[in-house]
Image (cartoon, rainbow, N blue to C red):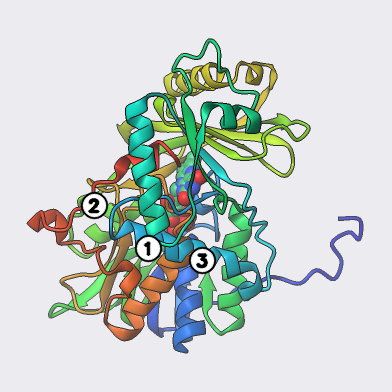
Amino acid sequence: GLTGNKGWQAHWRDATPKSEYDVVIIGGGGHGLATAYYLAKKHGITNVAVLEKGYLGGGNVGRNTTIVRANYFLPGNSEFYSHSLKLWEGLEEDLNYNVMHSQRGQIVLFHSDGQGDAMARRGNAMINQGDDAEMLDRAALRRMVPYLDYDNARFPIYGGMLQRRAGTARHDAVAWGYARGASERGVDLIQNCEVTGIDIEGGVVKGVQTTRGAIRARKVAMVVAGRSSQVAAMAGMRLPIESHVLQAFVTEGLKPAIDHVISFGMGHFYISQSDKGGLVFGGDLDMYASYAARGNLPLVEHVMEAGMALMPAIGKARVLRSWGGIMDMSPDGSPVIDRTHIDGLYLNCGWCYGGFKAVPASGDVTAHLIATGAPHTAGARFRLDRFRTGRGLMDEEGTGSQHN
Ligand code: FAD
């Protein structure tokens, strides 16, 4: 800033669309950009375009509360998020980009013996998967985070489970890092380019219609998170996805006070402190389907109450901003990365509240599927037909809403 921004270079080429690509990715969020990056880097497929209707990183990837963790319980999710966390741990070196990945640890609170038992079971599953988990009793927790309300709590605090390798990252830097890496390898990143139709002939995808003209493609991937149902409808598909608003909040900058991410599932509340000092926190969905990226006031009140119930001192902080994002909610809380019944058309969706931490693995797994035609071992269970057949459902919705 002090240099007047002179000499700064654009992070990526502002490409104009070509008439034809090997792969077109619809959606320039975290998952679309990561898919393009791994297609180019791991599979050498560079004749690729990412089509974004707004600006890169303007969707959920730049709106989330940035929690990165690998504490899922069920086979399918467990190996996928474990793979993702390992990719996070090498991401800055891989991209040569500072995404401010901070492994400050996440603590998930429990409020009864029964919840503690369930938490210990989850922790064991995490350790069996090769990740870390530690149970903290009330005294150990109190030493670590003394500012919670242990005496008059709305829900008595019995203890917590700590994952030290969990933490946060700077959300839009993740989008920018993947964008730069993909662009440097030849991928065309095309902004202000909305896909308005998908061309299909004889059950085979042929390309897309956009606000900047028709583009032919041998393969097309729909990677549009909250807009998945709308885009899939262009291919005649009806998805088992509902789009819901999730809100988040940030306070004025304060001195360092909260060292970890703290998740208070009983209150649907979670909090961390950004490097700028703002307390970043959020709660549950607004609970009605909507494409509006803003939320309602009753939920604001609910989140503030939950924050006050957990740590009354938070009442002195002034909230600066709140915002919302559109979540692609799947019926079992787990995602879809799969081919569709249309040859050459792929689907990546169903990230619910938890798709930021998934970005590296989702890009890797989706790129693998597109490039090789076979599912990656870390994402082989994310099949779309589980909702039709009932086989292979991974009912882990709570791990999103209660941990974020
Ligand atoms: P997006 O960034 O939304 O990308 C999709 C893109 O597709 C958008 O840019 C959109 O403009 C584009 N698009 C849509 N339609 C079209 C079209 N027709 N043509 C072209 N482009 C199109 N996850 C976590 O892991 N941890 C958290 O702590 C966390 N907290 C969250 C808090 C909030 C308030 C919100 C809103 C989300 C949170 N999430 C969290 C979830 C996470 O942000 C999302 O699951 C994830 O970002 C979704 O994937 P994406 O980045 O690819 O989506």
Res. 271 image quadrant:
top right
**Quick one: quadrant of the N terminus?**
bottom right
Q: Which of disc 2 and disc 3 is earlier in sequence?
A: 3
Q: Residue furthest left?
A: 389
Relative vertical location of residue 390 with respect to residue 137 in this rendering, above or below: below
In the image, taking residue 307 as reference, residue 331 lies left or right, namely left
Residue extending farthest to the bottom is: 44
Residue 80 marker: 1
Q: Earlier in the sequence, mark 1 or mark 3?
A: 1
Q: Which mark is residue 394?
A: 2
- Label 2: state its secondary structure: loop
| Circle 3 crowding by C-alpha within 10 Å: few under 14, some 14–19, many from 20 | some
Residue type beneath disc 2: Met
Mark 2 crowd level (few <14, some 14–19, many ≥20, 10 Å Cα): some
Of residues 67 and 230, which is closer to you in this image?
Answer: 67
Question: Where is residue 203 drawn, in percent x and y?
Answer: 14, 77
Give residue 381's quadrant in the image.
Answer: bottom left
The reply to whether dot 2 and dot 1 touch (C-beta < 8 Å) is: no
Question: Closer to the camera, 404 or 4?
Answer: 404
In this picture, is 84 found above or below 186? above
**Amino acid type at image mark 3:** Lys
Dot 1, crowdedness within 10 Å: few (<14), some or many (≥20)? many
Is any part of residue 28 visible from this angle? no
* Residue picked out by circle 3: 86
Say whether marks 3 and 2 touch (CB < 8 Å).
Answer: no
